[in-house]
Amino acid sequence: MIFKRKSTANSWQDILDGCLRRDSKAQRQLFERYANFAKNTCLRYAQNDEEAEEMVSDGFLKVFDKIDRYDSAQPFEGWLKRIMVNTAIDHYRRNVSKINWADIDDASQVPYADTYYKDEHLMNITADEIMAFVQRLPVSYRTVFSLAVVDGYNHVEIAELLGISESASRSNLSKAKAKLQSWISAYVVQQDEITHKHE
Amino acid sequence: MNNDFFERRIKEQLESVNRPMNPSGWDTVKKKLPVPWYLSFLREWGLLAMGGLIFSGLLGNIYYQFKNQQLLKRLYEENSTLKQEVVTLRQTSPPVAQLVSEHRVDTVYIVKKMVVEHRHTYEALATTDNEITDESVREKGVVEGKASKKYPFENKTLTSKVDRGKKASIPKENLTQTGVSAADSAEKGGGAVETQLEPAKDAKTAATAESDSVATNPIASVEKPKRQDTLSNVSPPLAKKSFKFPTPRVRVGVETEVGIGNLGVGPTLELFLSPHFSLTAGLHAHRFSSQEYKTVRDYNRATGLDFTQQFAAVIPPHDHLEEIETSVSTIEIPLGIKYYLPLRKEFSLVFATSTNIDVQAFNQVKFEAYKDGAEQYLSVENRNDPQSLYEYTFGVGVQKKWKRGIAQLEPFANFTFRQPEYAASYKNVFGVKASVWIEFGKK
């Protein structure tokens, strides 16, 4: 063949090189490859799917802008996850003036009466249901909880990232966990009651 | 309560969540990606550049028309002068013209005779005044030599005509080599063609012949018929036209644009650069139909914008917002070009393209804000930064004309290559423009 058809960039190196050249096709391939991973990272920092997708969009803009800083010897997922978490924190900072620092009991409706939490309650609840409860937390508690419990940041780092004191970080985490346990246990107990009634 | 187990279990569960990204996610990212420099340049300076080009084209066109008018004026003047001369000639010497036109063959003979006279004059001047250069003399010798060889009998007439040449006192400048050569060529038989090659010099030669043969009527009668013949077919002179700067042909009208979910109306001015080509500009008020969204999430999803950020200045403290209704209105300057293709007597096909410069843009937003269970209904108007050059409209329509009155109907397609933030939810794809006009100026 005299005219060789231009091949599409499919290999990882081709995609990276294309992104370095700001090639739109390569950027799209990178996005399509990692968009779900990025969204699932952002979900626990967002109130809902739409907000998570906004974070993903903003995060990928940073990825494309700073792709030259990525060290290809390291796993891309780790670098991408850090960028997405930082983007989520940017969202938090942008909205911090609108955050009502009311007590968690006032800020979020409690669906059921207090029930004592037991570890086995966690065995009877799905991942999506846990995610729904996390997303129901106020943004300040949700962010601290996700940073500390899921992404492994310590309170010093969290305090620095969010611009709050260490004690506030500890307090928010403690209250967030208590609330989640309360909701989860209440939810599981109610589900059990419904099941027994049907039987 | 085992906190470690709780945290580990929650972490595992949260990390196992797998919700796919919306398929349109890439489009959202692509919209926000930085654009190439030329697009950025176009956004920044495109309007100015286009305006400059149009203005330059307009000036160039006016200058071109002005130069054309000047040329026409000069041609008219020259034409009138020539016609006046023709009239004068006709009045002064009609019989001579008649005579010569019937004896064209004689001119060949007379030209030959002129050559002989030139030689003698030339020779006489050379010998008496001693002012002619050696080179001229040599050329003369060559010519004379040729003439002697070919026409030896001519020498007999030379002596008798030298005196006449002196009496005529021919100016030296008339005794050019060209004149001699041309005559020589004519002498050789093919002269009719060569003598016409240089009209100015021929005229000189003719003048020489005239002055040279004061007493010879046939020669004098030769020259006039030549001019008479060349001008005999010219039509009578026209009235002299004075120059006037071209009167612009303009139309003033009212244009209405109806699209999918939008309505625009306003005055428009149309300036014709040529009989079929025009520029249009107007001032239109445009209103887009209102859009309703149940929640902020719906709004954000439909527009790709953040409602709370977009209207941060007007949204009060709240727990949540509902029942959002937005409508957009703009004041814009539509700029366009049109080309008219005549169909029948009163109908024309109109090809048009246009773009908009938004001068003012307003977002009117109504929503319900809930705070501590209390509902608050709000209606506010938000003024936006107007944008320009974000769309092109292409249309083909029909025009009907009654004397100075014109009506046009033009379906159009709209190509929006970037969306202003204040009209993010509006996609105007097709529409119809209807307009009525009054025409002024020269057609």
Image (cartoon, grey):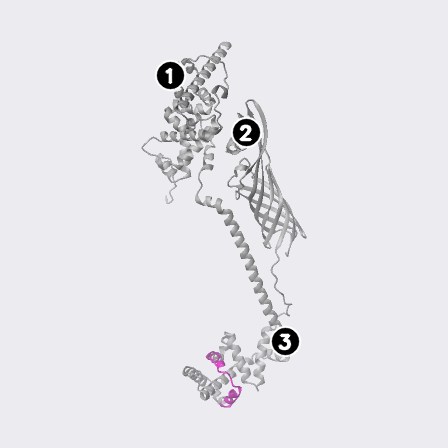
Q: Say if residue A37 shows up in the picture.
A: no
Q: Amino acid at mark 1?
A: Phe
The residue labelled by disc 3 is: B88
Q: Amino acid at mark 3?
A: Thr
Mark 2 or mark 1, whichever is nearer to me: 2
Kindly indicate whether the residue at mark 3 contacts the one at mark 2 (C-beta within 8 angstroms): no
Numbered range of the magenta stretch: B159-182
**Element type at marker 1?**
helix
Question: How far separated are the C-alphas under marks 2 and 1?
Answer: 42 Å
In this picture, is B100 found above or below B423? below
Label 3: few (<14), some or many (≥20) within 10 Å?
A: few
Q: Quadrant of the C terminus of chain B?
A: bottom right
Answer whether residue B174 is magenta in the image. yes
Label 1: few (<14), some or many (≥20) within 10 Å?
A: few
Kindly indicate whether the residue at mark 1 contacts the one at mark 2 (C-beta within 8 angstroms): no
Give percent across and percent down for residue A93: 44, 30
The residue labelled by disc 2 is: B316
Which quarter of the figure has residue B356?
top right
The residue labelled by disc 1 is: B5
Q: Chain of mark 1?
A: B
Task: Say whether mark 1 and mark 2 are on the same chain.
Answer: yes
Left/right of residue B194 with respect to residue B250 in the rendered view? left
Mark 2 or mark 3, whichever is nearer to me: 2
Label 2: few (<14), some or many (≥20) within 10 Å?
A: few
Question: How far separated are the C-alphas under marks 1 and 3?
Answer: 124 Å
Give percent across and percent down for residue B364: 58, 35
**Element type at marker 3?**
helix
- Upstream in the sequence, badge 2 or badge 3? 3
Q: Chain of mark 2?
A: B
